[in-house]
Image (cartoon, rainbow, N blue to C red):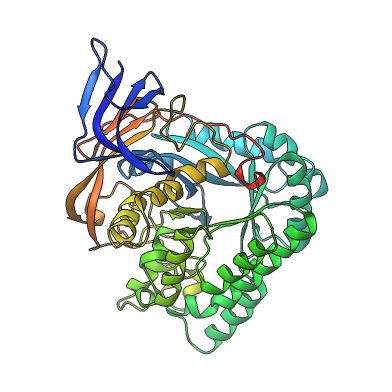
Amino acid sequence: MAVLIKNGTVVTAEGEGKADVYLKGESIAAVGEDLSPESGDEVIDATGKYILPGGVDQHVHFSFTYNGSKVRGFETSNAAAVGGTTTLIEFVNQEKGRGLVETIEDYRKTDADGISMVDYAFHMVMTDPRDEVIDEIPAMAEAGYPTMKLFMAYKGMFFHADDDAILKALYKGKEAGVTIMVHAENADMIDVATKKLIAEGKTGPYYHAVSRPPVVEAEATRRAIYLAEMADAPLYVVHVTCREALEEIKAAYSRGQRIFGETCSHYLVLDTEDLARPDYEGAKYVCSPALRTKEHRDALWEAVDRKWLNAISSDHCGFDFAVQKHMGRGEGKSFADIPNGAPSLQNRLNILWTYGVCEGKISRSRLVDLFATMPAKINGLHKKGQLSAGFDADVVIFDPDYEGVITAANNLEGVDYTPFEGFKQKGRPETVFLRGEKIVDNARYIGRRGQGKFIAGKPFGASYEW
C-alpha cells in the first residue's frame, strides 16, 4: 500500500518548504505540492509537523568487547528507529589472521542478518595490517564495504595501529575509493599519563579526562592529516571533541586537503563535570576521546554550523552501569579499567533538535545534513539520507510541539542508564517509515525483528568529491 504524507514542512539539506511526500513500495515516488492519492492509499495529515529523511548514524558499536565484556547488539536496534534513525553503520573488528571481507560477512550473518530492525552497513576496523591484508582493501570495497577505521589510541591493545599501517591503508584505500577513518589520540601520551596518574593514586573516573587531554587528540589529528597529505588521500576523523583538533582540520582545509570529520551528540551537551559526579556516577560518562570543558562544546557547535565538521553521530556503545562500568572500581582498579563508551543511539535527533535547533545553534536544514544527508554520501549509501524521488522511503514525521524529559525508563537501548538522564526534550519523531513500511507510530516502535536489511556502500563516496 502506498502512503501520501500531506501538509507537512519538508526539510532537506538545501532548505525547507510546504510539500507532500508520496511513498510507493520501498521508494519515494514524488515530493511536491498538492499531490493526490490513489484509491486505497493511506493518507497522513502532517499539518504542523516537519518531514525529515530517516537518519543515518555512521558510528555505532554493537560488537565491541572490552576486557571480555560485550556491549548490547543489533537486538536493540529498535532504539535507533524510535530516535528517527533508519540506517546505522557498525564497526567490525578484523580478527587476527583472518581476511577483511570474511570477517565482516561472518559477523553480518551471525549478528545482524535477520536481527536488525533498521537498515545497516559496516565499517572495517583493521587490526592485522600485514601486506596481504592491505592488498585486500579493494576486494573489501567491491563487496560493499567502502570504509575502514584505524585506531591511533589504545597502546598495547589488539586494534592499535601505528603510522606505518595508517599510511599503507591510505595509499591502498585511495586506489580503491575507500575512505580511511581514524580515531585520533596519541597512544603513547595516554599511556604515560595513565601510569603516572595511577601511581599518584588518582584513579577515579574524572582522571580519565586528565589522562587524555585535548593536546593528545590534536597531536594525533595533525599527524593523521599529514599522513593523508603524503598519500594524497582523503581522511575522515571520527568523534572530534576539542578546539585544538578543529584548528588542525581547518588548517588542512585551507591547504586544500580532503579532510572530513564528525562529532557526536554527547560531546555537544556533556562535559568534564559529568565525570566528576559523586558515588561513582562519573563512570557512566567515560568515553574516548574524553568529554571536554564547556568552551570546547561551544567550538564544536560552531564547527558543525560552519561545516568544518560534516556529521553528528552517536558513537553508541551500550555497556551497562551496574556491572560493566563498575569494572574500574575496587582494589587495584582505576579509570583505565572502565569500559569506554556511552549508550546514545536513541537520542541523537532529540539532542540535536532540542539543544541545536531550538537554541539557535544550527538550522533545521543543517541538522538534516549532519543527521542524514552527509553521512549517507560519505559512506556511499546513494539511496539514503534524502527526500527525493527514487530514494529509499525512509521518512520521519517530526512533532515539534512535544515536550518531555529523557530518561532511561523510556529507552530501548538495553542498558540501565542514559547519559542524558533528566535532559529536557522538545519535539520527537512521531512516525517513522523504513523503506515505505511504518515502523514507529505515535512514537512507539511497531516494526519487527529482522526488518532491516544490509545496504552495500559504493566506493568513491563524498570524501573523493572535492
Residue at 36 percent across and 62 percent down: it is 361
How many callouts does the rendering have? 0
Quarter holding residue 184? bottom right
Image quadrant in which the N terminus is located: top left
In this rendering, position of residue 10 left or right of residue 43: right
Looking at the image, the residue that sits furthest to the right is 131
In the rendered image, residue 363, in percent from the top left (x then y), is placed at: 36, 54
Asked if residue 458 is positioned above or below residue 371 in the image, the reply reads above
Residue at 56 percent across and 68 percent down: it is 246
In the rendered image, residue 189, in percent from the top left (x then y), is placed at: 64, 77
Residue at 60 percent across and 66 percent down: it is 250
In the rendered image, residue 385, in percent from the top left (x then y), is placed at: 45, 38
In this rendering, position of residue 287 left or right of residue 168: left
**Front position in the image: 392 or 423:** 392
In the rendered image, residue 63, in percent from the top left (x then y), is placed at: 51, 47
Asked if residue 356 is positioned above or below residue 42 in the image, the reply reads below
Asked if residue 145 is positioned above or below residue 322 in the image, the reply reads above
**Front position in the image: 422 or 106:** 422
Quarter holding residue 47? top left
Please say whether residue 243 is visible from this viewpoint. yes
